Image (spheres, rainbow, N blue to C red):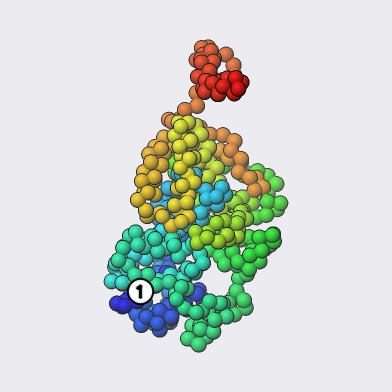
Amino acid sequence: MIGIKKTVLAYSGGLDTSVILKWLQDTYKCEVVTFTADIGQGEELEPARAKALKMGIKPENIFIDDMREEFVRDFVFPMFRANTVYEGEYLLGTSIARPLIAKRLIEIAAKTGAQAIAHGATGKGNDQVRFELGAYALNPDIKIIAPWREWDLLSREKLMAYAENADIPIDMKHKQGGSPYSMDANLLHISFEGRHLEDPAAEAEESMWRWTASPEKAPDAAEYLDIEFANGDIVALNGTKMSPAQVLTKLNELGGKHGIGRLDLVENRYVGMKSRGCYETPGGTIMLKAHRAIESITLDREVAHLKDDLMPRYASMIYNGYWWSPERRALQTLIDHTQQSVNGWVRVKLYKGNVIVVGRDSKTDSLFDPTIATFEDDKGAYDQKDAAGFIKLNALRMRIAANLHKCK
């Protein structure tokens, strides 16, 4: 690309992005700015700074940002207000992190005067789409460099050889073969793909799972948890007020302890292929179950059904990289409007891989009226004779059709 003097690289400090950093310097002869986001992946990030410095990056061009609160508050929580699930099972842990990273890449590009951003997503995956759609939505003039679509370093062996020739520090784990999986982690989930999992018939090894106990080995005693909601978001656990990131961290701890949130899924990627992944989303699994429980007593029936109708479309927007699109923003406005009445508490029981709702209440917004719903004498609160007319009116079209066929 012509006219690129400075590029912002989404940089983890691992083998791939370290090679990309050097490749950008060699191929584009440009100044590189590195950006490393802490979104709860649980890894020490300062080594990324040391590696970047060793590779000639100026100290003022190294950005390492703690984005955990923003990630949960502005991305995870809004997504869960919609009860978002992709293809019936996937809680979108990887997908929802990408628009935040794209946003920060664009912000840093503006701050440093960079003309381009670069990422390490491959040409086979969804992340290239998510990063780039987000970037273009926020800065239509930004240039994007995707090395995996340009270079010929398409195997681990070639990456290792390039790193050795360029004197790039290589972690011992890479020299010894690295992890058997491609992994992505943040506060919402951890994912596993590749190698052994590329055979969809093969069961994932128990040793693969990082965050969750095996349900068979989870505690024999159930644990109860009270979850408090305000405007659709969790604000307290067992009476203790918490920030968004603190909420998700605690839910992950409790859910992982009880073997909650494992998923083995073959999903349909945006680029057309099917891909198998395994996911651990303990906190998100609890959050989804509890959120639906509080909505069950605070949302009008048709509003709840409308949300359920719209949810798959909303999930596809996030999965396919359209977080910053006008249609997702418009839909979010509707969803957030419905959440004004989603206030109260839910009690769940955590037990051997299960999240069991055992109670819910809202002092201010409950639409559950026990005087009408009771199986005992309701003292005229509900006239059961009204049901006959309702049923006859709804049956009219079917009775007409049945009479027509009876006459033939």
- In the displayed structure, would residue 225 be above or below residue 96? above
Q: Residues within 10 Å of mark 1 (few under 14, many from 20)?
A: many
* Amino acid at circle 1: Thr
Residue 213 visible (yes or no): yes
Q: Position of residue 367 (x, y in %)?
A: 47, 28
The answer to which of 267 and 296 lies nearer the viewer is 267
Asked which secondary structure carries label 1, the reply is: strand
Residue pictured at 35% horizontal, 62% vertical: 136
The quadrant in which the N terminus is found is: bottom left
The answer to which of 404 and 385 lies nearer the viewer is 404
- Per the image, the residue denoted by label 1 is 7
- In the displayed structure, would residue 348 be above or below residue 18? above
Residue pictured at 50% horizontal, 19% vertical: 393
The answer to which of 393 and 324 lies nearer the viewer is 393
The quadrant in which the C terminus is found is: top right
Residue pictured at 31% horizontal, 63% vertical: 140
